[in-house]
Amino acid sequence: MAACEDLSGVIASGMCIGCGACVHADRSLRLVFNQRTQMFEPSGPGGPQAAAVCPAVGVDFDFLHRRIFGDAALTPLGVVHAVMLAQSTDHERNLRASSGGLIRELLIELLGREDVDGAIALDHVGGLRFEPRLITRPQEVDGLPGSICHALAFDKALELLSANAGRFVLVAIPCQLEGIYSYVYRLRPELAGRIRFTIGLLCGWQYTHHALRAICQFKGIDFDRIEHIAFRGGGPVGRLRIRTPEGQWQINRRVDFAYQVAFDRSFNIPRCHLCINHSNFLAEIVVGDAWLPSTLRSSTGVSLVICRTPQAAELMQTLKRRGRVRVAEVTLEEVVESQTRRVAYGDFSYAYAKYLRKIGAHCPEMVGPNRGAARLWPERAVRRFHGALCRKLALQRQGRYRRLYWRKLTLEIGPFLYRYLRWFCVRVLKIKSLLRMRREVPKARLSDFL
């Protein structure tokens, strides 16, 4: 990976993901909130050390894989020991999570072990502010929030890791782990021994605060008075819930048109469009929604679990033996089907990176184990996406969210309806199974799932 002098390109392109690695590498920097882009970024360009650990400059996956997993064999989705479908047997915990309740079960189990001193996980500070905190008791787990999908500063994770002796579980999305591990193995290798276990999320996207401003405008919510927000909960898919002193709003994430506008891909943090690591290659165990036809009728939610080490697989079996989770072993095919191959293999992201380099735009250097399996989108499709994205970003930064609403309702209504038709055909009618393009998980293997 070529050396980079500073973070100028990251700031100019809005590629920062807020992991905080740069502010620990270069103490002249801090994470600040950019009102125009509605996301976090470094306070200045810094120097080579900050650039060397920034995931928006590049990620050396080969280097990190060797440090974390040794000589373990790689699949196109990273090191994989086992793949499972699972859900918590605690109905309320499962229902609150909307996707199986697995992360809470894993944390409760790990925090009860003598070789674990605590866990670093996201907690609610106030309003839209969430940040990592250290918990040490299993009883604290259920008080943690669920998945948080908007831009936040994660620099406190490294602060906690540096300031506390012991062995800790770290819960993070892919790009956060990329930044943390890049910092640890390049600048502070002694901290590697403090990371006892990593729980990663299968990550779709993060959103700038423009998405929240847009949905508030559409629903008549006072953005500046938001006291709390939850992106999931209440069953599969879950609802977006926003609370202010005036009341609470629940917004259907599946069918509400205003939600589909406000959480359109154009509202993603820009680096999300270039992410080739949605499967979280660097986490020992990875948990995410199982978006599969076989799990569609779950009343609470089902998790897709990737165990990257034998220890992770044994942890899942321990939870199963203790009656804490239901488990059905599946294959990598279910990971690809759940995430879509475009996301799992980086079909779009690799093609978009190639296009950005061609036009001279800033682009992080990332080549993951999935590169050989990727089928790159044609350049004309990528060029069309980029042009539309630039127009939408300009409208967002002017606060013209209503224009985006009407754009979705007119110019983009065809692709919007096609996506729902495809979802109905693939997930409900199981058309791919009928055409023998894939095999479903047998119903008998999921008979005890709720």
Image (cartoon, grey):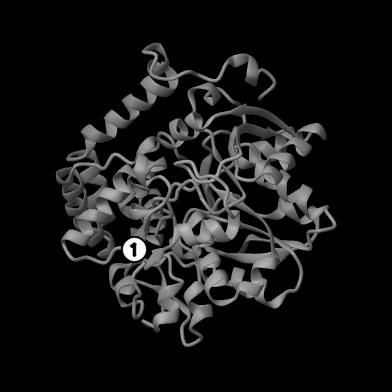
Quadrant in the rendering for residue 137: bottom right
Residue pictured at 35% horizontal, 65% vertical: 15
- Left-right relation of 372 to 30: left
Residue 284 x, y percent position in the rendering: 62, 50
Under circle 1, the secondary element is loop
Quadrant in the rendering for residue 151: bottom left
Residue 291 visible in the snapshot: no
- The residue tagged 1 is 364
Q: Quadrant of the N terminus?
A: bottom left
Residue pictured at 40% horizontal, 83% vertical: 46
Residue 71 x, y percent position in the rendering: 57, 52
Furthest toward the right, the residue is 114
- Left-right relation of 60 to 235: left
Check the image and report above or below for 406 versus 446: below
Residue pictured at 51% horizontal, 67% vertical: 182
Q: Quadrant of the C terminus?
A: top right
Q: Nearer the viewer, residue 107 or 64?
A: 64
Furthest toward the front, the residue is 71
Q: Nearer the viewer, residue 310 or 422?
A: 310
Q: How many marks?
A: 1
Check the image and report above or below for 440 versus 141: above
Residue pictured at 39% horizontal, 60% vertical: 208
Q: Nearer the viewer, residue 378 or 61?
A: 61
Residue 65 x, y percent position in the rendering: 53, 56
- Left-right relation of 175 to 14: right
Type of the residue with mark 1: Pro
- Left-right relation of 121 to 439: right
**Label 1 CA crowd tier, 10 Å (few <14, some 14–19, many 20+):** many
